[in-house]
Amino acid sequence: MGYDRQFLISLYQKMLMIRQFEERVKFLFLEGVMPGTIHQYQGQEGIAVGVCSALNSNDVITSTHRPHGHAIAKGLTVASLLHELFGKTTGCCRGKGGSMHVGDLEKGMVPAIAIVAGGIPIATGIALAFKFRKEPRVAVSFMGDGAVNEGAFHEAVNMGAIWSLPVVYIVENNLYSASTPIFEMVRLKKLSDRAAGYGIPGVTVDGNDVLQVFETAREAVERARTGEGPTLVECMTYRITGHSRRDPCNYQPEAERKEALQREPLRRFGEYLLKGEFVDQAGLDEIRAQVDAEIECAVKSAMAAPDPKPEEALEDVFV
Amino acid sequence: MAVAIRLPDMGTNVEECKVLSWRVHEGDAVKRGEVLADIETDKAVAELESTAEGVLLQLIAKVGDLARTGDILAYVGNPGESLDAETKVVTAPANIPQGMAAPVAPLSQLASGSSVRVAPVVRNLAAKLDVDLRRVQGTGLGGVITREDVQRASREVAVAPEGTTPPGEPLPRAQAAVARAVLKSWKEIPHLSITASIDMTSAQEIRTKSDVDGGRVSYDTIFLKAMARAAESLPLVAAKLEGERMIRPQGIHIALAISLDNELQLPVVRDIGKKDLVSLQKEVADLIVQVRSRTLRADRLCGGCMALSNLGMYPIEAFDAIIFPEHSAILTIGAIQMRPMVLEGEIKARPLVTAKLAVDHRIINGRTAAAFLSKVKEIIESRNSL
């Protein structure tokens, strides 16, 4: 597995950007500076970065109520996200979407859909469009584990399968659908076994190993792009924060949590890079300093940006 | 520079959260993100994380205190740093219910050198809006003046711009607050009223025999004591309603209505059940002096669960009163009058007083009200109960 050093470092840089972005946002929220609520991505960075690194810039993703990681991995700047989170006109959705609807079609991200499983039929429809237009592009639908029990999941995945659409379904299984343990809600041992019901390949990987996610996604994307149809990829992971900022998360058993945090993706990948001598500690520290500086700069500009005018509420409205 | 640790937004429809426990002490080193306290919301227990690194300088909220989003719970700063006058929030008497201290706190008390409880950012806002903080009633935790309070005060001033004096004279500040409180009660609390005559023969004897530094125990004191005794056996009558939650009383504290010129004050006598008549009488007399001399501390106006109002110095037989917001009931008494009464088949003249009890009918039904008033009557009429 001869990876290019620059490529590996860019994976680390993006994962760290997501982690630090989320931590900064968390404190903005605690300090009462940030309005609204947020669903955060800490602990799942390996999945967004692994999958999006296997995509071309004109491939398209759909996201969920937990979209910050997907957005950063797909190339949206932290500034465009922070401006959006603060409700500023300069945000990626002109401040009208907020945390749960970040996105930018120019970057290949449909504004996130907060309804559980809501993005699956849409990604499938986008893939249908690519097929009709004979464009060699791929759609990816990110979803949480709870989405697999939604009707929309069944209908859309089946449709993607029968028409061999260029779509990849990524299940981020962090073990909890909000606070409900997913394995109390299915009799399966692996959610990827659902794939058999649609006659498509299904695979479960360690979602906290960014390279394993990347390799799996690369295969699935290749299959989709060459007309072989969808793949269902289950990425096992763990949420470090609560379901939302207001969720104290005390349903995660202490022992399970402690054990899971041993495998959190960022530190693990950092250690891999150090061990393989792709970078030294000073190099990692430098990346961290750059990431923090970029986020700090974005926070300042977002807070300073002007608030939208009341009359702007009448723009972008379709009747 | 010390950083204020505030209660974050804990969720939709969560209005108040309770500080369940502190995990750190004043003087402890804390890291950013470290858990400082356990906070109870309507739904769950959540952790309060520090937004700053340094030393915990001061805990503002105490265990059991209720707080709203944005309320300051603690300060974190550099080791040895003292909270300067700007930052410092004077530690308030614990457990002042919100909106309680405020409505009737007289300006003189606030102005007489005691610190106004306010965060620097709010102080700056007040300066910008030209609002005199001494005239603002704080509605935050423990009476802290919030940004909203200042904005409201600014709007109130703006309603009457200079030069266009509206007709009439402005109400005294405290009376304006009473006006708002009475209107709020009248609109929000469905009053249920019941009446009983009480034979004051025993009470008159107790009063005549008493000696409090040469003076006597007053009927106010006797009624306060009887109400407290009765409420201790029927605590439901002292409960209050918050939203759709019933809050049981922490102790039996009863307010006594005292008028001063055209103003009404309701100082609270705390823990009445634990005090004997003589010390209670001294406290009541002292409160009256403080009201008349306008030296009453604002915290003496807080925390009551019901009130007593006495117009017995006038030839009034009985009267209806309005329950004070946050109280569950008000007992009124008119003059003691010799009236005919049938005792063992014969008409006798007895000193009678008519007591009327109004209760908040949202939480107290007629039967509970009747049980309470009967108990008050029984205690006052019996020779040995007080």
Image (cartoon, helix red, strand yellow):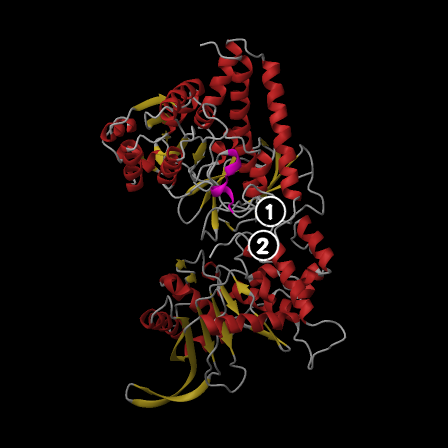
Where residue B251 sits, quadrant-wise, is bottom left
Asked if residue A187 can be seen in this view, the reply is yes
User: For residue A89, which numbered disc appears in the image?
Assistant: 1
Q: Position of residue B364 (x, y in %)?
A: 36, 68
Q: Amino acid under label 1? A: Thr
- Circle 1 marks a residue in which chain? A
Badge count: 2
Identified at 29% across, 24% down, the residue is A201
Residue stretch in magenta? A97-107
Identified at 62% across, 59% down, the residue is B149
**Callouts 1 and 2 close, C-beta under 8 Å:** yes
Q: Residues within 10 Å of mark 2 (few under 14, many from 20)?
A: few
Q: Position of residue B318 (x, y in %)?
A: 45, 83
Q: Amino acid under label 2? A: Glu
Where residue A248 sits, quadrant-wise, is top left
Check disc 1 and report its element: helix, strand or loop: loop
Q: Nearer the viewer, residue A295 or B231?
A: A295
Q: Which residue is mark 2?
A: A312
Q: Position of residue B1 (x, y in %)?
A: 69, 38
Marks 1, 2 in one chain = yes
Q: Nearer the viewer, residue B213 or B189?
A: B189
Identified at 68% across, 61% down, the residue is B110
Which residue lies most toward the right here?
Answer: B163
Give the vertical position of B308 relative to A55 (above or below).
below
Q: Is residue A121 left or right of residue A73?
A: left
Sooner in the amino-acid sequence: mark 1 or mark 2: 1
- Circle 2 marks a residue in which chain? A
The alpha-carbon separation of the residues under discs 1 and 2 comes to: 9 Å
Q: Nearer the viewer, residue B129 or A293?
A: A293
